Amino acid sequence: MSGYEIIMMTTFGVTMRSIMQIEAGAIGIRLGATETIVVILIKQLQNKSRVMRRIKTGVSILLTALVTVSLMSCKDEKGQLESTDNERLQLYAEEKSSEETLKNEVKEVKSGPVDFTEAAKMVLDAVVHIRATQTGRNESSDRLPRELPDFFRDFFGDRFQMPENMPQQPMYGSGSGVIIDEKGHIVTNNHVINNATELEVTLHDNETYKATVIGSDPTTDIALLKIKGDNLKALSFVNSDDVEVGEWVLAVGNPYSLYSTVTAGIVSAKARNININPEKFAVESFIQTDAAINPGNSGGALVNLDGKIVGINTAIASRTGSYSGYGFAIPSNIVTKVVADLLKYGSVQRGMLGITIRTMNGGLAKEKNMEFIRGVWVENVGEDSAADKAGIKAGDIIVNIDGSEVTTSPRLQEIIAQHRPGDKLSIIVNRKGREREFKVTLENVKGTTDITKKENVEMLNYLGADFEALDKETARKLNLDGGVRVVNLYPGLLRQSTQMRPGYIITHIDGKKVTNIKELVAILKNKKGGVMLEGVYEDVPGKQYYAFGLDS
């Protein structure tokens, strides 16, 4: 009530108090009853003395006061009703806008302050720790052949191999990986498992497994492992092309062997090339993030707030070897393509244009004495390459591939790396100020559209190697009838039992000539006991021998 109403209750005592204590909605009714009582009193006192007339005057004053209070109360009643209606309208408005508010909150999740706990819970069980054990000689001594000096060879002959089983101190490496399906397939970096003789995987609940290598691709630094486990938690991928700069991401891994570490940041940039991969046909088009990444995070997951993989953490840019604000992850679109190839074909199927490229910028435009055009400059076109056959020429500026704008060399590499030999692409180039479209059929490194599928995957995984038949030109140069080249080595029998290095060309197994992979597998498939490999390296003179044992 107002101050005025309180004063009135004090002045008119109990009668007024009894009137004013009722609800505002009933004031008018109570006031009418009071008026009737007052009128009767006036009629009874009309013929009384001056004292009674004073009472009449007092009662009149009372009536006037009551009417005033009634009018004020009616105004308050109306105001209260209007206020109540407004509150209801406001409530309905809030209910009606609740869905819109939810959408706004979802939008804030992508770009503003947010709770990361739910995303972390979804991810932790699927990110694993990988311990890589390396036994044997270091890399530099691996490059030296196991060959006797001429003086001793006169005594023992070419087939003698120097002892390899001398005690060696094992070395250990640490990294991360991500379970991608319930079958136990794990994605990690190739550099995490490279040169390892044994791999041990530890889950978030501290359960451990031995891992086998399904395959790897050094050009993208991706490796695929497998463990035999039950009820494994797996993560799925999203389209990395849809990831936006400024979007929240979490980096999950095992830095410095600190298991199951989660850090948060944003996507700082896309299509970064930091020239860290030494491979000839390396593909670098990283997602850059400021989420803290340190040694041991390699192979771990970079996920969005839905707990989906946007990339595989791979590298950092640092002068100290530790986090300095710049981390890099392989985009999920490249990862999924490599994994699909390894599972389906046993090796990665790389489609190639056959060109040398440079990112177009102001400096290059000045060098070429032309106007600046956003795109990728074609420096050279390989003779009889896929691009050459389609009509692309040196000096063209590639601006679009299959509907995707191309402004940098890493972005072009990323798009092409997602395709296989035989895939057809529409490429738009700017040639002397005019845009032209070309249909290009990608080819493999040998200049064909063939897809090579690895046979007898179980045997080759057991050996821990990728093989390819020796091409005729190399065979002729080395004066060989043929052979099988060791392309890559993984944790497996050959690495555990020998000092073989990639590039070794197998020409004989137990004295039998080998010219292709089928012959190699046929000899080893049912072999038991000791095996002697004979072969050569292109960069080392003379024959080299390796021996190992097969259980079955």
Image (cartoon, grey):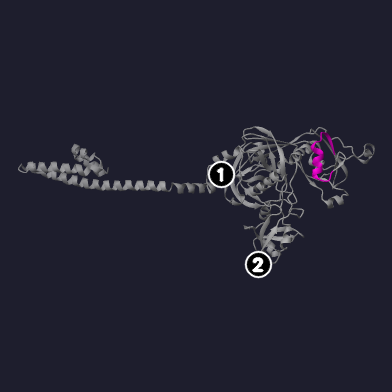
Left or right for 34, reference 169? left
Where residue 67 appears, x then y in whole percent?
A: 19, 46
N-term-proximal mark, 1 vs 2: 1
Where residue 197 appears, x then y in whole percent?
A: 75, 37
Compute the Cα span from label 1 to label 2.
43 Å
**Any mark on residue 110, and which?**
none
Circle 2 residues within 10 Å: few <14, some 14–19, many ≥20: few
Left or right for 161, reference 186? right
Q: Is residue 523 magenta?
A: yes
Q: Is residue 85 magenta?
A: no
**Any mark on residue 434, and which?**
2
Where residue 221 appears, x then y in whole percent?
A: 70, 46
Circle 1 residues within 10 Å: few <14, some 14–19, many ≥20: some
Image quadrant for the N terminus?
top left
Q: Nearer the viewer, residue 511 or 394?
A: 511
Q: Nearer the viewer, residue 415 or 144?
A: 415
- Residue at point 32% right, 46% down? 84
Residue 383 falls in image quadrant: bottom right
Residue type at tag 1: Asp
Residue 430 falls in image quadrant: bottom right
Of helix, strand and loop, which one carries label 1? Answer: loop
Q: Is residue 26 visible?
A: yes
Residues in magenta, as a range: 514-532
Residue type at tag 2: Arg
**Residue 174 position (above or below residue 394):** above
> How many circles with numbers are drawn on the protein?
2
Where residue 183 appears, x then y in whole percent?
A: 65, 38
Of helix, strand and loop, which one carries label 2? Answer: strand
Residue 186 falls in image quadrant: top right
**Any mark on residue 306, and which?**
1
Image quadrant for the C terminus?
top right
Left or right for 512, reference 176? right
